[in-house]
Image: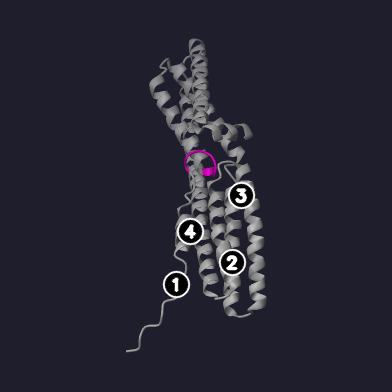
């Protein structure tokens, strides 16, 4: 699977081309075998039943896997929104404390939000790991200020800031967990093997019938390939074009720019 990931990080289209070529070769081999057997034994009706079962099973597994991949993509997207909201809540509470420690926490949270957006945008596992190390250092520094705030100002407001910061850190762990597990290698190879085997069986059936139907076969191969590539793209956090948006973090960072302004009390009537 490492080789597949390396190729996919370079180009997901390359994975699609290799997968399509594998299916085309399997189909042509199946046609050749079918033509040879047709000369000796003729066509057997049971072959069509087996081929139909294989194609139906492949379609069913592709549907299940696509649902799994979409769930993983949705999990990462929802996690990014929840974390951005948690960081924004912690920043608002830190600004409302009215204490130098609160101001320091708010400024650090602004930098922390940018680092978390960098984690989501990271193109490779190595870049994500480097960003995670910076995130951990920032969390340690922020929590040090939170601990000092609670000791210097032990009241419900400080406790609310501590809870909000803790929630933001928990959301970061949940988001990191969602990014840590791509499409299982066994699942990808199972899909690839089933697609190749199905094309081999289909080619064998067409060879027995002496009707290659290459155009329709290539259309079916194209459909299988597109679906499998989209599954790989959806399920893998840092492969392909379908990435989690950082819009939620950017909107949160934009909200920091206005600061917190305490308006004067309205004049009595």
- Which mark is first along the chain, 4 or 2? 2
Residue 266, position as x, y percentages in the image: 37, 83
The Cα atoms of the two marked residues, 4 and 1, are separated by 17 Å
- The reply to whether callout 1 and callout 2 are in contact (CB within 8 Å) is no
Distance from the alpha carbon under mark 2 to that under mark 3: 20 Å
The label nearer to you, 1 versus 2, is 1
Magenta segment, which residues? 235-242
> Which residue bears the numbered disc 4?
253
Numbered label attached to residue 131: 3
Where disc 3 sits, the SS reads helix
Mark 2 residue crowding within 10 angstroms, few (<14) / some (14–19) / many (20+): many
Q: Position of residue 172 (x, y in %)?
A: 58, 57
The earlier-in-sequence mark between 1 and 3 is: 3
SS at mark 4 in the image: helix
Foreground pick, 67 / 151: 151
Whole-angstrom CA distance, mark 1 to mark 2, is 17 Å
């Amino acid at each position: 699977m490492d080789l597949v990931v390396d190729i996919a990080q370079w180009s997901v289209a390359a994975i699609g081309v290799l997968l399509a070529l594998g299916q085309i070769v399997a189909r042509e081999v199946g046609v050749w075998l079918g033509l040879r057997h047709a000369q000796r034994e003729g066509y057997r009706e049971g072959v069509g039943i087996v081929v139909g079962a294989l194609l139906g099973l492949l379609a069913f597994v592709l549907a299940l896997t696509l649902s799994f991949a979409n769930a993983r993509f949705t999990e990462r997207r929802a996690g990014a929104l929840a974390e951005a909201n948690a960081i924004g809540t912690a920043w608002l509470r830190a600004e409302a404390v009215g204490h130098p420690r609160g101001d320091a926490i708010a400024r650090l949270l602004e930098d922390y939000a940018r680092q978390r957006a960098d984690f989501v945008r990271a193109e490779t596992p190595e870049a994500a790991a480097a960003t995670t190390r910076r995130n951990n250092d920032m969390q340690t520094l922020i929590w040090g200020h939170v601990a000092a705030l609670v000791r210097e100002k032990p009241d419900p407001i400080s406790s609310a800031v501590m809870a909000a910061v803790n929630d933001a850190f928990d959301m970061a762990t949940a988001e990191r967990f969602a990014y840590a597990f791509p499409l299982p290698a066994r699942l990808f190879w199972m899909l690839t093997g089933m697609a190749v085997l199905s094309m081999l069986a289909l080619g064998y059936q067409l060879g027995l019938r002496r009707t290659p139907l290459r155009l329709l076969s290539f259309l079916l191969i194209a459909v299988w390939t597109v679906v499998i590539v989209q599954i790989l793209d959806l399920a893998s956090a840092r492969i392909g074009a379908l990435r989690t948006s950082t819009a939620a973090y950017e909107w949160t960072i934009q909200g920091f720019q206005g600061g917190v302004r305490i308006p004067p009390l309205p004049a009595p009537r």
